[in-house]
Image (cartoon, rainbow, N blue to C red):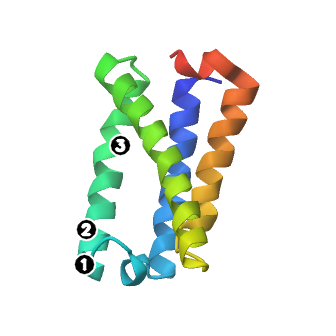
Amino acid sequence: MNLKHLAILMYMVLILHQIEEYIYEFWEVFPLYDMAKSVFIIFNVIVSIVLIPVWVYLWHNRVWAINIARVFLVLMLLNGIWHIGWSIYLHQYMPGLITGITFIVVFVFFVLKYGRKIYSV
């Protein structure tokens, strides 16, 4: 297991995360600004599509793809922490919380099990 495997797994969790947020209407409770449903959908589709070439080039060990994958992993970890924090702050379920926790669990599992190996390609 390495960075490639972790990045692909986190990408699959991201897709589930986006589905969870859509089902529970994340745009209705987004705490930072009023978000239209269409903005939410367009943003998530763009993110999902833009990341596909990153994963393709990650398998070819392209430095730029490796760096984007590393940033992606940190952002997904922070996303999970953010969902937990807002759920605690609001004292209620925040859409995306379950898969947000999954981001953290997957990241921590890989770090504990594989350590420095996940940072190699």
Q: Around disc 1, counting alpha carbons within 10 Å, would you say few (fewer than 14), some (14 to 19), or many (20 or more)?
A: few
Query: Rounded to the nearest whole Å, what is the CA distance between mark 1 and mark 2?
Result: 6 Å
Look at label 1 and name its amino acid. Ser
For marks 3 and 2, give the one nearer the viewer.
Answer: 2
- Please determine whether, in this image, residue 76 is positioned above or below residue 17: above
Q: Quarter-wise, where is residue 116 in the image?
A: top right
Looking at the image, is mark 3 or mark 2 earlier in the sequence? 2
Q: Is residue 41 left or right of residue 70?
A: left
Q: Are marks 1 and 2 in contact (CB under 8 Å)?
A: yes
Q: Residue at x 35, y 31 (%)?
A: 68
- Numbered circle sitting on residue 52: 3
Residue carrying label 1: 38
Q: Is residue 77 left or right of residue 110?
A: left
- Measured as percent of width and height from the top left, residue 92 is found at 60, 80
- Measured as percent of width and height from the top left, residue 33 is found at 27, 74
Look at label 3 and name its amino acid. Ile
Identify the element where label 3 is drawn: helix
Identify the element where label 2 is drawn: helix
Look at label 2 and name its amino acid. Ile
For marks 3 and 1, give the one nearer the viewer.
Answer: 1
Q: Quarter-wise, where is residue 97 in the image?
A: bottom right
Residue nearer the viewer, 52 or 111: 111
- Numbered circle sitting on residue 16: none
- Measured as percent of width and height from the top left, residue 85 is found at 55, 62
Query: Rounded to the nearest whole Å, what is the CA distance between mark 3 and mark 2?
Result: 16 Å
Image quadrant in which the N terminus is located: top right
